[in-house]
Image (cartoon, coloured by chain):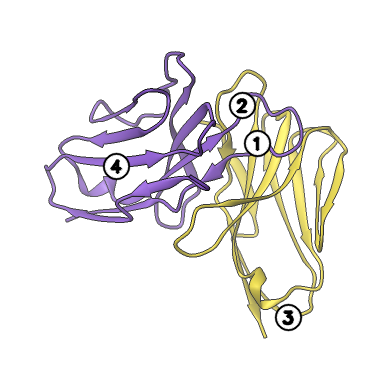
Chain colours: A purple, B yellow
Amino acid sequence: GAGVSQSPSNKVTEKGKDVELRCDPISGHTALYWYRQSLGQGLEFLIYFQGNSAPDKSGLPSDRFSAERTGGSVSTLTIQRTQQEDSAVYLCASSLAFRFTGGSYGYTFGSGTRLTVV
Amino acid sequence: GQQLNQSPQSMFIQEGEDVSMNCTSSSIFNTWLWYKQDPGEGPVLLIALYKAGELTSNGRLTAQFGITRKDSFLNISASIPSDVGIYFCAGRQTGANNLFFGTGTRLTVIP
C-alpha cells in the first residue's frame, strides 16, 4: 500500500485478556519497527525486524510482549494478560534500509493503535 | 534506552512568531531527525541530519546537527496555525537498530 497500515485503530480490552495488533508495512520496506507512546511521553522502542534476520527484541518491556513478522511483510504485536499500564498508542514504522545513508531513509509511521486496558 | 532531553515541553506562541526548540543527549549520535505528530496520526519526518555541524532547511524549518554530536535544534520561522502539533527529535547511534526519541515539544499557535 501507499502507507503503513495499522489495525485496529482503537482497542479496548479487559485487564488480563490477550490482544493482537497488526501492522502492514509499505511494500518493499525491509525494516519494521514497533514503538509504544504513552500519554505525554516520547516514543519507546519495542522491537525491530530487518529482512530475515533475527529480530532485535531488546525494547520489549516484559515476556508478556511478543511480535512476529510473517513472510517479511505483515507484523503482529501480541500482548498477553494485559495490564492497565499497557494502555498506550502502539506505533508501527517501516523503512527501506537499516542504514540511514542520506536522503529519505527515515521511518514512515502508521497512525497507531490506541490500546485501552480497563 | 538512551535519554534525549527535549525542551521546551510546550510552547504557546502568536501566529507569525519564530519558534526554537532543542534536543540534548549525554551520548553521541550519528544521525539526528526531527518529526512532527498531528493528533491521531503517527509522526512524520521533517528534516534529517547526518553530519556534525550540518544545517538543513525545509521551507520555514531549519535544523542543525550540533558540533559535539550530542545536540540538535529546530527552528520554525513565521509560524502559522497548521504548525500546531508535537515535535519530536530522534537520534541514532552507530550500530543501533533503532531511533531514540525525545519526549516531544507541544506547539500551540494562537491565530
Measuring 52% from the left and 28% from the top, which residue is drawn there?
Answer: A31
Residue contact at pointers 1 and 2, CB within 8 angstroms: no
Toward which corner of the image does residue B24 lie, by quadrant?
top right
Q: Residues within 10 Å of mark 3 (few under 14, many from 20)?
A: some
Q: Please name whichever residue, A104 or A41, is drawn nearer the observer in this view of the structure.
A: A104
| Residue located at (72% from left, 33% from top) | B31
Given the image, what chain letter belongs to the residue carrying mark 4? Answer: A
Label 1 vs label 2: CA separation?
16 Å
Can you identify the residue that label 1 sits on?
B91
Q: Chain of mark 1?
A: B
Say which residue label 4 marks. Answer: A21
SS state under label 4: strand
Establish if A30 lies above or below A112. Answer: above
- The residue singled out by tag 3 in the image is B15
The CA span between labels 4 and 3 is: 39 Å
Which mark is in front, 2 or 3? 2
Q: Secondary structure at mark 3?
A: loop
Give the amino acid type for the residue marked by disc 2 in the picture.
Answer: Ala
Q: Is A80 displayed left or right of B111 in the figure? A: left
Question: Is the residue marked by circle 1 packed among few (<14), some (14-19), or many (20+) residues within 10 Å?
Answer: many
Residue B63 location (% of width, % of height) = 80, 50
Q: Residues within 10 Å of mark 2 (few under 14, many from 20)?
A: some
**Type of amino acid under label 1:** Gly
Q: Amino acid at mark 4?
A: Leu
